[in-house]
Amino acid sequence: MKILASTSIICMALSTSAFADQTWTLNTWEPPYDFSNAPSTIEYTALDKASKDWNLCVIFPHLKDPYWVATNYGVVKHAEDLGVSLTLYESGGYPNLDEQIAQVKACADGGYDAILLGTVSYDKMTPAVVAAAGSAPVFATVNQIQAEGVSGMAAVNWVDMGRAAGRFFKENHPSGSQAVKVAWLPGPESAGWVQFTDTGFREAIDGAAVDIVAVKYGDTGKDHQANLVQDVLDEFPDVDYIAGNAVAIEVAMSILRQRKLQDEVKLVADYFTPAMLRGVKRGIIASAPTDSAALQGVLSVDQAVRFLEDKVIADHVGPIIFNVDADNVATFPIDESLAPGDFQPTFEVKPSS
């Protein structure tokens, strides 16, 4: 298995508790893992302590951007709070399907009590998940996956994330107004969340005065996204907006400053990171929806432990999506969306003795 850093960072349990025993209003879906029906809401209270030191295997697509670092923070913090062990592996990026399949198999063979999976593919991981589920229950974390072999899911409907991003255009550039030219950079084309976000975005802007002049897919590494932003500005010098994944919007902020275009090209994100927070505060980014990535990490650990202890509340839960903008940026619960500034990617948690 591949570990992002050459040496793992090991966290011992902290003395303070950030999420244990807290209660949130969450969305839940029935039947679970199926976003075709509208969600209902439930009151969900996190566990305070686990009954034993369960050993969890966590697999993420990567830790190349702050979104997954926030989810990393959520799983690590709640594992610390509950007093369970955790080992985290990252797959190196969304193109690395074979790497993630091998990691799932290794976790299934490694004697873990449960596997938490941030999948790199909505459907291509299914055979590996079904095989692994014979050894340990598998819980989908953040990224939606096919239902076969899954024992729980902490995820939002990424169609709704796209809708939230597109709603900005529907509200600010309605039908009949002068059309704006938008470049759309949703992320890696093979990733399920990108397909869902694209669907929601296009649905939300239907009927708005929007002309999508460019669509650029690509991995969410900063260098790759910077190249895509540069390509957009070179090919479409009269573009009005760049919209899309948070990495693209982050690098676009600096590229626009370099090109002295910060007053000409506006930015809209389709998910939330620390850079989105700074951009909204400074008035550079118009809006950025949050699905509370850190909270999703908390919920995934909580789901796994509840399943192991026969205390399940719901098979499929997710935070309620909302836009962060100038109106609420000073008041929303930041710790549910972002990792603290001093948090470093963490690969192992061992309870203190």
Image (cartoon, rainbow, N blue to C red):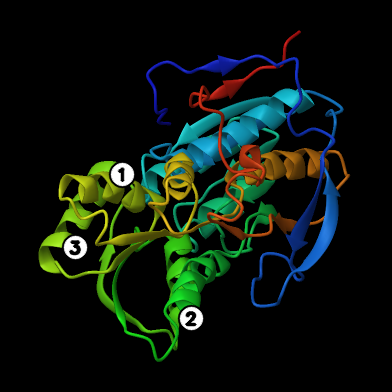
Along the viewing direction, whichever of 121 and 328 lies nearer the viewer: 328
Task: Return the residue at label 1.
Answer: 221
Q: Nearer the viewer, mark 2 or mark 1?
A: 2
In which image quadrant can residue 233 be found?
bottom left
Along the viewing direction, whichever of 37 and 151 lies nearer the viewer: 37
Whichever of callouts 1 and 3 sits on the residue coming sooner in the sequence is 1
Q: CA distance from mark 2 to mark 1?
A: 27 Å
Task: Return the residue at label 3.
Answer: 232
- In the displayed structure, 136 sits above or below 350; it is below
Q: Position of residue 292 (x, y in %)?
A: 61, 48
Q: Position of residue 286 (x, y in %)?
A: 44, 59
Task: Return the residue at label 2.
Answer: 203
Report whether residue 221 is seen. Answer: yes
Give the tally of numbered discs.
Answer: 3
Residue type (three-letter) at the residue carrying disc 2: Glu
Residue type (three-letter) at the residue carrying disc 1: Gly
Give me the residue at 27% from left, 61% from top. Answer: 265
Residue type (three-letter) at the residue carrying disc 3: Val
Q: Position of residue 178 (x, y in %)?
A: 32, 84
Whichever of callouts 2 and 3 sits on the residue coming sooner in the sequence is 2
